[in-house]
């Protein structure tokens, strides 16, 4: 699929992987809706970075865990751009809790992470699916994590929520075929603000990876765009971890 003039929604598009993906989509000619929940300044900066290079982008606020807000967000995008052709389900949250500390993995933590990381992705996919079905083509990329494959991560509920994202991807690929392709990217460690204050630990990890480096948001963004463009693929979980799982 040629991304030129396609309308793309990127959730959590103001920072990190979301910002890099929004910028890369614009570079490839897409019109980009940069979603944010709290990071309005960051989202506006992402839009500025796109428009100053001649691209087309808007900010749109919505808490993806709230279905009503998601549906209003999509209506806003349609009012501006006419439709939604591409969805990058990137918005995610985590809690840093030792894996073995089961008592700290409270019901509130489980609900919070599942509401955003899993239900939020479903709500967004459900909201844009009729638009894509109407045009008889569309593509969705869900941003998962190798935590969902290895079971290890910043917390047990986070790892399980990302495993659920991968399962959601496969189920949506069945539910939305043949018009809409759905795949998932499973990044390993990525040099984003999630590592703020832990730069030394990040560098230590890099030394143990097969490629001796941590992926950048731009690495992941290029892969996301390539998956959106690839018309012969759906239902896939694609790992980009600099060899983290192979070490």
Image (tube, helix red, strand yellow):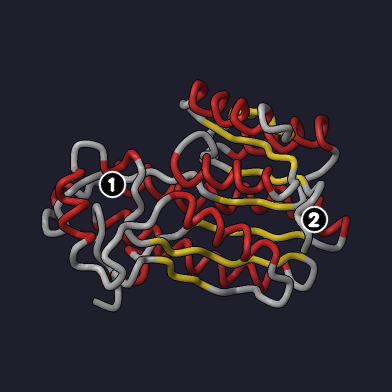
Residue located beneath label 2 in the image: 132
Residue situated in front as seen by the camera: 155 or 143 = 143
Task: Find residue 110 and report its horizontal and vertical position in percent.
Answer: 32, 49
SS type, badge 2: helix
Q: Is residue 120 left or right of residue 130?
A: left
Q: Quadrant of the N terminus?
A: bottom right
- Give the label on residue 52, or none: none
SS type, badge 1: helix
> Residue sitting at 62 percent across and 63 percent down?
226
Residue located beneath label 1 in the image: 107
> Residue sitting at 80 percent across and 55 percent down?
132
Q: Quadrant of the C terminus?
A: bottom left
Q: Is residue 158 left or right of residue 105?
A: right
> Residue sitting at 46 percent across and 36 percent down?
15
Dot 2 surroundings within 10 Å: few (below 14), some, or many (20 or more)? Answer: many
C-alpha span from label 1 to label 2: 36 Å
Q: Is residue 199 left or right of residue 54?
A: left
Task: Find residue 216 and report its horizontal and vertical position in percent.
Answer: 40, 52
Q: Is residue 69 above or below residue 207?
A: above
User: Which one is earlier in the sequence, the residue at label 1 or at label 2?
Assistant: 1
Res 212 quadrant in image:
bottom left
């Amino acid at each position: 699929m040629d991304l030129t003039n396609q309308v793309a929604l990127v959730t959590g598009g103001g920072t990190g992987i979301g910002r890099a993906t929004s910028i890369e989509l614009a570079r490839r000619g897409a019109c980009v809706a940069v979603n944010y929940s709290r990071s309005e300044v960051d989202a506006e900066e992402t839009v500025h970075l796109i428009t100053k290079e001649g691209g087309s982008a808007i900010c749109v606020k919505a808490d993806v865990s709230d279905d009503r807000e998601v549906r209003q967000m999509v209506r806003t995008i349609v009012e501006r751009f006419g439709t939604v052709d591409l969805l990058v389900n990137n918005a995610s949250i985590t809690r840093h809790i030792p894996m073995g500390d089961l008592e700290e993995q409270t019901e509130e933590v489980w609900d919070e992470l599942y509401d955003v990381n899993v239900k939020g992705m479903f709500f967004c996919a459900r909201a844009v699916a009729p638009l894509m079905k109407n045009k008889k083509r569309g593509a969705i990329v869900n941003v998962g994590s190798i935590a969902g494959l290895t079971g290890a991560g910043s917390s047990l509920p986070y790892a399980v929520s990302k495993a659920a994202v991968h399962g959601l991807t496969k189920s949506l690929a069945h539910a939305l075929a043949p018009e809409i392709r759905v795949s998932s990217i499973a990044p390993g460690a990525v040099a984003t603000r999630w590592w703020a204050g832990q730069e030394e630990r990040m560098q230590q990890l890099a030394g143990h990876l097969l490629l001796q480096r941590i992926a950048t948001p731009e690495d992941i963004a290029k892969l996301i765009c390539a998956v959106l463009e690839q018309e012969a693929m759906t239902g896939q979980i694609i790992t980009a971890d600099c060899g983290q799982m192979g070490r």
